[in-house]
Image: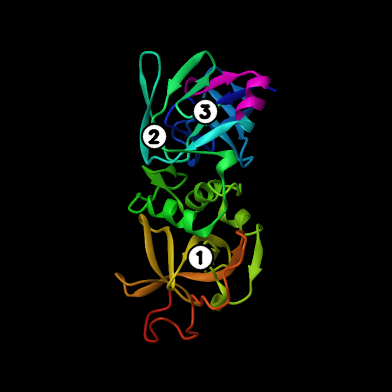
Amino acid sequence: MPFGICPFSVIPVRSMPSHRSELLSQLLFGELFEILETRGRQWYRVRCSSDHFVGWVEQAQCKLITPGEFEQYRDNFAYSLELVQAVMGPDHFVPVTMGARLPNFDGLHFRLGDLVYTFSGQALTTNDIRPGADFLMKMAKRYLNTPFLWGGRSPFGMDASGFVQIIYQFAGIYLPREAEAQIESGEVVDFIEKAQPGDLAFFENKAGKIMHVGLIMPENRIIHAFGSIRIDLLDHYGIYNQEQGRYTRRLRLIKRLLPPPIPPSNVLFPETEPIYKQAELF
């Protein structure tokens, strides 16, 4: 089975082999995929290696690699921690975003096929990953004001599930691409009063379908994608948007993926009443 790697800042993963088809997801620089099908001379149907998401990418935006390179790049890389930072090639620059992968990074250089690149920004190697809520909060806040983009996973546009997926990668936890699949991960938190920073809150529509997810923060807050990456209030009813004066999302479930637990004395949600009793619910 052929393999490939994303050699550009970000490339679209579409629902069909057409530029007019829906944007389902994106591949960031250095992310790997398997090629499942070839359609003519323009399109590949691929399976992304980190989350097994399947979609269509343009052949001209892919770099083919050998099975040996695929294994090597998959197990040895560093994450870029810069919101946007250029990597310097032999005669060109490539802007890479936070969450991009730098194969075989030695602290200054990495190799992609026959090309050697220089990266001078902050990076996180897989050996340095320490799953902790404080670090995830810092990473999440760097994306504040990123515009909402259905299928997006970069600082130039993200959706809710893409946002939490990228953030949790920094903790070494690989989530599925879509919120309705992400809810199957972790352990259930029975009551919002027991929620801890870094927990994931999932939200349903009127039909009961999981349509949204966000990262719980201290002090009754949540960071999520709604128009942009933003911070709103959260209680056992859902997300309360102070600007609109109403609840915008209905809470379904809270899941915990990060160890260790925070001491019980740190209570995030001491109140059981809604944030605003007279507020419009959804």
Q: Nearer the viewer, mark 3 or mark 1?
A: 3
Whether residue 36 is visible, yes or no, is no
> Which of 65 and 21 lies nearest the eye of the viewer?
65
Q: Amino acid at mark 2?
A: Gly
Residue 30, given in percent of the width and then of the height, sits at 51, 30
Query: Mark 1 sits on what residue?
Result: 197
Q: Mark 3 and mark 1: span between their CA atoms?
A: 31 Å
Residue 136, given in percent of the width and then of the height, sits at 48, 54
Q: Nearer the viewer, mark 2 or mark 1?
A: 2
> N-terminal of the two: label 2 or label 1?
2
Using the rendered view, name the quadrant where residue 32 is placed.
top right
> Which of 282 and 262 lies nearest the eye of the viewer?
262
Rendered position, 234 above or below 93:
below
Q: Amino acid at mark 3?
A: Phe
Q: Residues within 10 Å of mark 2 (few under 14, many from 20)?
A: some
- Disc number for residue 105: 3
Query: Mark 2 sits on what residue?
Result: 121
Q: Is residue 232 magenta-colored?
A: no
Q: Secondary structure at mark 1?
A: loop
Q: Secondary structure at mark 2?
A: loop
> Which of 186 and 11 lies nearest the eye of the viewer?
186
> N-terminal of the two: label 2 or label 3?
3
Q: Secondary structure at mark 3?
A: loop
Residue 277, given in percent of the width and then of the height, sits at 40, 86
Q: Amino acid at mark 1?
A: Pro
